[in-house]
Image (cartoon, rainbow, N blue to C red):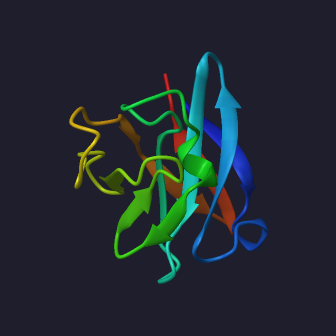
Amino acid sequence: MATRICSLDDLKPGKAIRVKIGEATIAVVREPSGTVKALDDKCSHGEISLSEGFVEDGAIECWAHGAKFDLNTGKPLSLPAYEPVAVYEVLIDNNDIFIEYE
């Protein structure tokens, strides 16, 4: 089922927001190129919100310890994280962002 998150205009390029869908907390990221991605908001290294991190080069970096995660796969790109985070399908329809979440 797709859940509407916000308007594409509400999410600035290079930024992320935190949303709650059911029990999941998800970081919705708009890359500088304009592409929108979604992944678990919690860094797999600790209880840190990824949506508060830095977005660049197809990755989001945890602000606390510097672990980077690939926005396409959720795989860690640097230590101290070694476990991936889940990624979610993003749909854009009529300038609205939706996330597929069961």
Where is residue 67 drawn, in percent x and y?
35, 50
Identify the residue at horizontal 21%, vertical 36% (top origin): 82
Identify the residue at horizontal 49%, vertical 68% (top origin): 55
Pick whichever, 59 or 2, lies toward us. 59
Pick whichever, 1 or 76, lies toward us. 76
The relative height of residue 102 versus residue 90 in the rendered view (above or below) is above
Pick whichever, 74 or 80, lies toward us. 80
Identify the residue at horizontal 53%, vertical 27% (top origin): 47
Identify the residue at horizontal 51%, vertical 81% (top origin): 32
Q: Residue furthest top?
A: 23
The relative height of residue 54 versus residue 39 in the rendered view (above or below) is below
Where is residue 96 drawn, in percent x and y?
69, 60
**Quadrant occupied by the N terminus:** top right
Where is residue 27 drawn, in percent x and y?
57, 46
Total labels drawn: 0
46 to the left or right of 17: left
